[in-house]
């Protein structure tokens, strides 16, 4: 009987772990949130505490939850840091000597769909973060500051709004490369103003959940920015920019 029940217990614990993992990835469970005790969850799911314990153990091994002992203990959603993954990917792209043309292709393939997902999935807090960043970028522009330090952060936040972890990690890595690409380029105030205007239009499309507009505006924005970079690089090298 023990041999026959083991697989079933394993399947139950896997189902529980999958349910919790889905809740974490979707944002229904947030870092620091306390999970139900083994007893409470077992009663609610009408299963054994052993299955719940196995599920919690597997999630702890994956680094998704922390299990603390003692009177104030329990299972808590872990604060997962994806920064090292993003930095590792950025490093690999740099070592591969990613060209401007490859970076352009990547942005054109990534960012319009990301903007569409952001329009579909963003919540009130996401919209507020984007709005706050746009205010800071506009203030920097009016005060003769450099709004570029907010520019790529806007694109990172749009990727967060998309609620897709792989896309967010890849977008952050691409943004890291863009920081290097634009750091040595002089940008006029008209160009800075144009970028702020594009960001505002993308934001408005996301806020009203207009997926098509968000994608199309982002596409035009990326094309303009990358074309400007191509002309700058070509001028430095004394060549003609390649048409895409």
Image: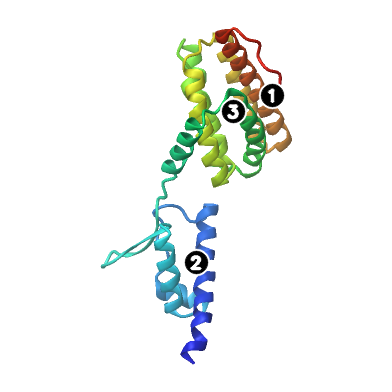
Real-space CA distance between mark 3 and mark 1, rounded to the nearest whole angstrom: 16 Å
Task: Sort mark 3 into few (<14), some (14-19) or many (20+) by Cα contacts within 10 Å.
Answer: some
* Residue closer to the observer: 218 or 46: 218
Looking at the image, is 201 positioned above or below residue 58?
above
Where in the figure is residue 55, as x and y percent of width and height? 45, 69
Q: Earlier in the sequence, mark 3 or mark 2?
A: 2
Which residue is identified by label 2? 17
Q: Which residue is mark 1?
A: 220
Q: How many marks?
A: 3
Check disc 2 and report its element: helix, strand or loop: helix
Image point (44%, 73%), residue name = 52
Q: How is the image coloured?
A: rainbow
Mark closer to the chain start, 2 or 1: 2
Percent position of residue 205, x then y: 67, 32
Element carrying mark 3? helix
Q: Can residue 132 be seen in this snapshot?
A: no
Q: Regarding mark 1 in the picture, which secondary structure is present there? A: helix
- Residue at the outermost right position: 212
Q: Position of residue 181 (x, y in %)?
A: 51, 21
Quadrant for residue 40, please give it: bottom left
Residue under the point 47% across and 10% down: 144
Front residue of 164/47: it is 164
Task: Kindly identify which residue carries mark 3.
Answer: 103
Foreground label between 3 and 2:
3
For residue 167, which quarter of the picture?
top right
- CA separation in Å, label 2 and label 1: 42 Å
Q: Outermost residue, left direction?
A: 70
Which of 117/40 is in front?
A: 117
Mark 3 or 1, nearer chain start? 3
């Amino acid at each position: 009987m023990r041999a026959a029940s083991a697989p079933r217990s394993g399947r139950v614990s896997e189902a529980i772990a999958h349910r919790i993992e889905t809740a974490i990835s979707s944002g229904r469970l947030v870092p620091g949130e306390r999970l139900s005790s083994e007893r409470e969850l077992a009663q609610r799911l009408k299963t054994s505490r052993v299955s719940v314990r196995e599920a919690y153990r597997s999630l702890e091994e994956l680094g998704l939850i922390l299990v603390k002992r003692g009177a104030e203990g329990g299972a808590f959603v872990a604060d997962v840091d994806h920064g090292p993954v993003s930095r590792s990917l950025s490093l690999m792209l740099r070592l591969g000597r990613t060209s401007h043309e490859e970076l352009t292709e990547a942005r054109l393939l990534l960012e319009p769909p990301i903007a569409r997902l952001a329009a579909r999935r963003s919540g009130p807090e996401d919209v507020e973060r984007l709005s706050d960043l746009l205010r800071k970028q506009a203030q920097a522009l009016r005060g003769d500051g450099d709004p570029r330090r907010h520019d790529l952060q806007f694109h990172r936040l749009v990727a967060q709004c998309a609620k897709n972890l792989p896309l967010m990690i890849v977008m952050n890595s691409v943004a890291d490369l863009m920081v290097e690409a634009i750091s040595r380029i002089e940008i006029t105030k008209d160009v800075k103003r144009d970028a702020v205007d594009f960001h505002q239009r993308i934001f408005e499309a996301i806020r009203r959940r207009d997926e098509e507009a968000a994608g199309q505006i982002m596409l035009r924005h990326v094309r303009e920015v990358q074309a400007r970079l191509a002309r700058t690089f070509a001028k430095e090298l004394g060549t003609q920019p390649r048409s895409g």
